[in-house]
Amino acid sequence: MTDPTLLVLASLADGDKHGYAMMEDIQRFAGQRLGPGTLYGAITRLEQRGWIRPTGGDDRRQPYTITASGKQHLEEQVASLDQVLKTAIRRLKHA
């Protein structure tokens, strides 16, 4: 999974985070290092779609939280990816 928007949603699914914390979390769980431009571009798109929202940080770092519609979108995408993975695994057995 390399889609930055899905990686950000997956990161926020276990709690609110600011940008740097998301970058570190994504690096840990996906082995993918998002640059600041990629990360903040994804954050902007997700905010515009209503899938995440800022929570109001105390300092210059702005934490974000996943919204109910963002969680629903992530669940739909994960189900779709699960189907692709199951199909690929089945087909590899016959390759």
Image: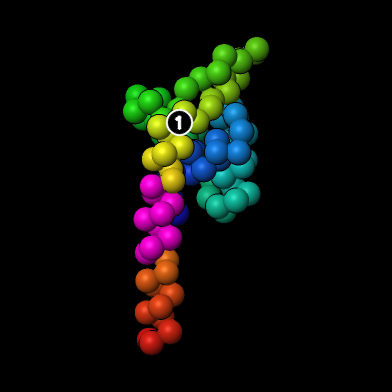
The vertical placement of 30 against 65, above or below, is below
Q: Which residue is situated farthest in the right direction here?
A: 58
The residue wearing badge 1 is 68
Element class at badge 1: helix
Residue 40 placement, left or right of 61: left
Q: Is residue 90 magenta?
A: no
Residue placed at 38% from the left, 47% from the top? 76
Q: Indicate the quadrant containing the C terminus: top left, top right, bottom left or bottom right.
A: bottom left
Query: Residue 83 colored magenta?
Result: yes
Q: Residues within 10 Å of mark 1 (few under 14, many from 20)?
A: few
Colour treatment of the image: rainbow
Residue 58, image x, y percentages:
65, 12
How many discs mark residues in the rendered view? 1
The x, y position of residue 35, in whole percent, is 50, 38
Specify the amino acid type for callout 1. Ala
Q: Residue at x 49, y 38 (%)?
A: 8
Residue 63 makes an appearance in the image: yes
